[in-house]
Image (cartoon, rainbow, N blue to C red):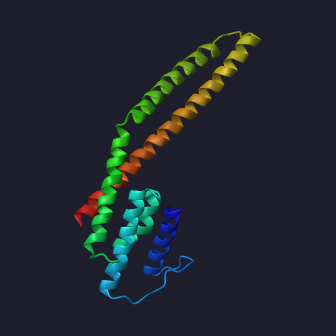
């Protein structure tokens, strides 16, 4: 209960400080550099707190708190450093996940699925070459084709998942390099 109240208060404070009203619309507020710096620090500190407490997802923290903090006061080193540290931590987590046992098991399972797919395709091709097939063989061929389709779909899904993971890591790495370079 206290965490939810704290989260609600943090969201309200950062929304008001950054000039966002209740409905998320940005209000143009004339702020001095020190006020802009304070707002940026409020946003980035809230983002850091949410990250440590794991009360929001990493994408939400990055998009709603850390990146707007840097945009709000680009010359503020604290908000920029917190964004860079956050991106570095996310990249470290992603890389660790890619060398984890779970990831290795998923890769091995994908390779086994590919091997099963090739074998099922080979069996279906041999069965299709038979000059005369009994009713039983026709049913077996139909079941084999269904298996080929399911295995092919599983392989496609796995490859899409692996490609998305790779793209996510690449994007994080580029963001880290960009932020640490500034």
Residue 104 spot, x, y in % from top left? 39, 32
Residue 147 spot, x, y in % from top left? 62, 25
Residue 41 spot, x, y in % from top left? 34, 74
Q: Residue furthest bottom?
A: 30
- Decide: is 160 above or below 26: above
- Decide: is 90 above or below 50: above
Residue 73 spot, x, y in % from top left? 32, 77
Q: Residue furthest right?
A: 135
Q: Is residue 125 toward the left or the right of residue 177 in the image? A: right
Q: Residue at x 37, y 88 (%)?
A: 31
Q: Residue at x 64, y 20 (%)?
A: 144
Q: Is residue 67 visible?
A: no
Foreground pick, 72 / 38? 38
Q: Is residue 181 visible?
A: yes
Foreground pick, 148 / 24? 24
Q: Residue at x 35, y 75 (%)?
A: 40
Foreground pick, 127 / 22? 22
Q: Residue furthest front?
A: 2
- Decide: is 37 above or below 175: below
Q: Residue at x 34, y 79 (%)?
A: 38
Q: Quadrant of the C terminus?
A: bottom left
Find residue 50 and report its image quarter: bottom left
Q: Is residue 74 toward the left or the right of residue 150 in the image? A: left
Foreground pick, 120 / 105? 105
Q: Is residue 124 toward the left or the right of residue 50 in the image? A: right
């Amino acid at each position: 209960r206290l965490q939810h109240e704290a989260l609600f208060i943090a969201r309200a404070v950062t929304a008001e400080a950054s000039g966002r009203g209740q409905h998320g619309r940005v209000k143009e507020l004339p702020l001095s550099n020190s006020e802009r710096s304070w707002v940026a620090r409020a946003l980035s500190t809230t983002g850091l707190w949410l990250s440590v407490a794991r009360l929001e997802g990493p994408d939400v923290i990055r998009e709603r708190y850390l990146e707007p903090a840097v945009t709000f006061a680009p010359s503020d080193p604290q908000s920029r450093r917190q964004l860079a540290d956050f991106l570095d931590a996310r990249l470290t987590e992603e890389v660790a996940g890619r060398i984890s046992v779970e990831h290795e098991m998923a890769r091995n399972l994908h390779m086994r699925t590919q091997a099963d797919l090739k074998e099922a395709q080979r069996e279906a091709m041999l069965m299709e070459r038979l000059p005369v097939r009994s009713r039983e063989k026709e049913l077996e061929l139909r079941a084999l084709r269904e298996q080929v389709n399911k295995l092919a779909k599983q392989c496609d899904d796995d490859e899409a998942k692996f490609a998305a993971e790779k793209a996510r890591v690449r994007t994080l790495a580029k963001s880290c390099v960009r932020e640490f370079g500034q």
